[in-house]
Image (cartoon, rainbow, N blue to C red):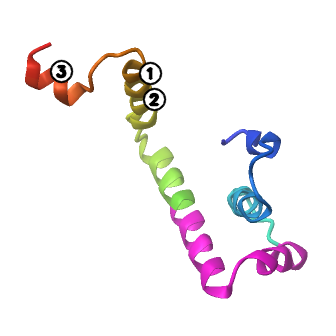
């Protein structure tokens, strides 16, 4: 949901929305985490949970920027997984089973 489309998802609770907003805000240069937003986080998360969220967001931001610098491209694991799920819904056996059967 890199494009902010999560904002239009009605089934997300407030805590999840704040976690996603934290990821967006922390990724900006410079990060846009003000006291008011931090207070909102504290309404839904404990101090250790906020630390964990911040660590995850920071690590993913680090990895993404590191990969850009070195020209590392994704392997589309997520897209491959979705394609495998689509095939399963169409009655095609999983790849591991197809390899065993020779099909």
Asked whether the beta carbons under mark 1 and mark 2 sit within 8 Å of each other, the answer is: yes
Residue at x-position 71% and y-position 60%: 16
- Residue density around tag 2, few if under 14, some if 14–19, many if 20 or more, within 10 Å: few
Q: Which residue is mark 1?
A: 86
Q: CA distance from mark 1 to mark 3?
A: 15 Å
**Mark 2 or 3 closer to N-term?**
2
Return the x and y of residue 17 as percentages of the image width and height. Answer: 76, 57
Q: Nearer the viewer, residue 76 or 81?
A: 81
Q: CA distance from mark 1 to mark 2?
A: 6 Å
Q: Quadrant of residue 14?
A: bottom right
Highlighted range, magenta: 34-59
In the displayed structure, would residue 21 be above or below residue 93?
below
Q: Which residue is mark 2?
A: 82
Q: Quadrant of residue 50?
A: bottom right
Q: Nearer the viewer, residue 94 or 81?
A: 94
| Residue 98 - label | 3
């Amino acid at each position: 949901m890199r494009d902010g489309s999560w904002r239009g998802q009605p089934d997300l609770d407030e805590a999840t929305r704040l976690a996603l907003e934290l990821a967006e805000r922390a990724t900006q240069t410079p990060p846009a985490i003000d006291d008011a937003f931090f207070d909102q986080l504290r309404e839904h998360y404990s101090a250790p949970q906020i630390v964990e969220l911040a660590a995850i967001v920071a690590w993913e931001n680090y990895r993404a920027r590191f990969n850009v610098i070195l020209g590392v491209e994704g392997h589309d694991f997520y897209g491959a997984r979705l394609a495998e799920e689509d095939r399963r819904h169409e009655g095609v056996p999983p790849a591991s089973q197809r390899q065993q059967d020779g099909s």
